[in-house]
Image (tube, grey):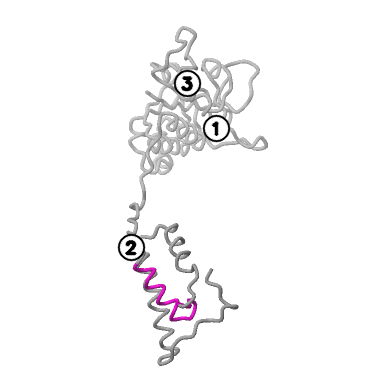
Amino acid sequence: MKTRFVLINTSHAGNVGAAARAMKVMGFDDLVLVAPRWANVLNREETIQRASGALDVLKNARIVATLDEALDGMSHLCATAMTPRDFGPPTRAPREHFSKLLSNDEPSSPENKGLQPDSVAFLFGSERFGMQNDDVYRCHVALSIPTDPKFGSLNLGAAVQLIAYDWRQALGGFAVQPATPEPKLADAAEVAGMLGHWEEALTDIGFLDPASPKKLMPRLNQLFNRAQLSPEEIHILRGVAKAMSRTANKAVPSAVKTPAPADTLDPQ
């Protein structure tokens, strides 16, 4: 769906750059500034620095003199207003409204009831004063980002990021790209071989009595099955078993290892 972000009377150049960055990471690129404080705000150093690479959004952004120009061609208008008003459009949380909007339960106008709008504009007021009442009144909804009731002050760039994120999620979101490949699991033969190695090592250190093994090895088998070991982890555990046997053999080079007394070690 065509999406536009409209910043009205923005006074801080850095916030324009931050808004561009917030939009780009969520896949949006239509930015319009209405009468910003600086006529050259899109080229100011602070703007470019805060954009952090979202230069294409700044390059395509437009500066217009009036809100009418900024909203040209947009069908559904969303104000962002934290201050309650006695009159105007309904106030809703972004996610609640987006869900209704995309399910055709929230018409852009009475004559379009049951129809999904083809475009959405998000309007943000100035950092100091927010949106003017007349600008809010022309919108279909006033979006209020849920915050701590005792402190609801949001930076403009942060507000754009939150709205952009919720809107992108409502549209289907982006798939999370795994940072690491899915591990390959060791097969049953590898696990069985490692268990045999551990059985020898546990016998060498006197923890397992071959004459009375009880259920130690089956329990270890279940433990390792739950761990879903990879081949690399099998190699590590075999290395541990090898080190245990080597240490035990060095400690008692010519004697047969005697299992620990049953009252001090219980393999079960």
Q: Earlier in the sequence, mark 2 or mark 3?
A: 3
* Stretch in magenta: 193-210
Query: Residue reaching furthest bottom?
Result: 254
- Looking at the picture, tell me which residue is in the foreground, 226 or 172: 226
Which dot, 2 or 1, sits closer to the camera?
2
- Which numbered marker is on residue 33? none
- 44 or 211: which is nearer to us? 211
> Looking at the picture, which amino acid does disc 3 mark?
Leu
Q: Position of residue 250 (x, y in %)?
A: 41, 88
Name the amino acid type tagged 1. Answer: Glu
* Marks 3 and 1, the one that precedes in the sequence: 3
* Label of residue 231 in the image: 2
Q: Which residue is mark 1?
A: 127
Label 2: which secondary element? helix
Magenta segment main secondary structure: helix
Which residue is situated farthest in the top direction here? 111
Distance from Cα at disc 2 to Cα at disc 3 = 50 Å
Which quadrant holds the N terminus?
top left
Q: Nearer the viewer, residue 130 or 46?
A: 130
Residue 72 position within the rendered picture, expressed as x and y whole percent measured from the top left: 40, 16
**Spatial CA span between label 3 and label 1:** 27 Å
Is 206 inside the magenta-drawn segment?
yes
Q: Are marks 2 and 3 in contact (CB under 8 Å)?
A: no
Choose top left, top right, bottom left or bottom right for residue 256: bottom left
**Which dot, 3 or 1, sits closer to the camera?**
3
In the displayed structure, 71 sits above or below 161; it is: above
Left or right, 73 with reference to 263: left
Q: Residues within 10 Å of mark 2 (few under 14, many from 20)?
A: some
Q: Looking at the picture, does residue 46 appear above or below residue 130?
A: below
Q: Which residue is mark 3?
A: 101
